[in-house]
């Protein structure tokens, strides 16, 4: 299954001030999430940003807050448990691209709920993390077995463009250089 610009939505999950330093490769996750967010903006892909319990986990990290719409605050681990989340997904959406924190909690529960709702779910595996490698690894195996499509941020960008003749290709290409 390939990603389509017209049916994709980017969902950036809980990349917050107190979580990023606690997870493995937090800076890489922020960089890859920003890459996806900037490409989504260039290509007209709708994006949704969430925050889990902001009081305890802090705000979205600045590199992402400055390129994404205001966050949807939530207490449920799955984004689908937040009433405003469903309203933020366009009716034309059939594919959700997920990235963020933590893989085995909010990302996994969101992915499983979205699958149950009939969406195709793509997971940018270089743009997710957990505090412990075992949690991330087991979650990835579980999600792939459930039907989530694993991919990378760079693969997503080029799949959204489809061809080097896309009007935004050069701008998108610069995001990975």
Image: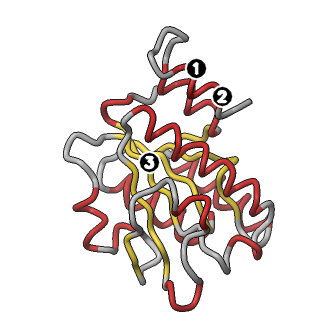
Name the front one of labels 2 and 3.
2
Determine whether, in the image, residue 98 is placed left or right of residue 26: left
Q: From where the camera sits, is residue 44 visible?
A: yes
Q: Are marks 2 and 1 in contact (CB under 8 Å)?
A: yes
Residue where numbered disc 1 is placed: 170
Q: From where the camera sits, is residue 1 visible?
A: no
Q: Residue furthest bottom?
A: 55
- Whole-angstrom CA distance, mark 2 to mark 1, is 6 Å
Q: Report the disc number at residue 174.
A: 2
Residue at the (50%, 58%) spot, across then down:
12
Secondary element type, mark 3: strand
Q: Where does residue 99 sit, x and y in percent of width and height? A: 56, 54
Determine whether, in the image, residue 57 is placed left or right of residue 129: left
Q: How many marks?
A: 3
Q: Where does residue 114 sit, x and y in percent of width and height? A: 37, 56
Secondary element type, mark 2: helix
Query: Which quadrant, please, contains the C terminus?
Result: top right
Q: Where does residue 160 sit, x and y in percent of width and height? A: 47, 27
Q: Residues within 10 Å of mark 3 (few under 14, many from 20)?
A: many
Residue at the (75%, 70%) spot, across then down:
23
- Whole-angstrom CA distance, mark 2 to mark 3, is 19 Å
Residue where numbered disc 3 is placed: 10
């Amino acid at each position: 299954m390939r990603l389509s610009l017209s049916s994709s939505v980017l969902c950036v999950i809980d990349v917050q001030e107190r979580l990023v330093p606690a997870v493995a490769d937090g800076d890489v996750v922020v960089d890859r999430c920003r890459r996806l967010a900037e490409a989504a903006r260039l290509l007209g892909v709708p994006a949704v940003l969430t925050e889990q319990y902001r009081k305890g986990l802090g705000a979205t990290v600045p590199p992402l807050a400055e390129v994404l719409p205001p966050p949807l605050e939530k207490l449920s681990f799955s984004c689908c448990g937040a009433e405003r989340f469903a309203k933020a997904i366009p009716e034309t959406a059939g594919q959700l691209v997920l990235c963020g924190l933590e893989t085995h909690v909010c990302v996994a529960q969101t992915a499983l709920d979205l699958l149950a709702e009939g969406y195709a779910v793509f997971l940018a595996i270089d743009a997710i993390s957990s505090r412990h490698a075992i949690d991330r690894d087991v979650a990835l195996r579980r999600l792939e077995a459930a039907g989530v499509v694993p991919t990378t941020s760079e693969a997503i960008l080029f799949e959204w463009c489809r061809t080097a003749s896309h009007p935004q290709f050069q701008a998108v290409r610069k995001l990975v250089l």
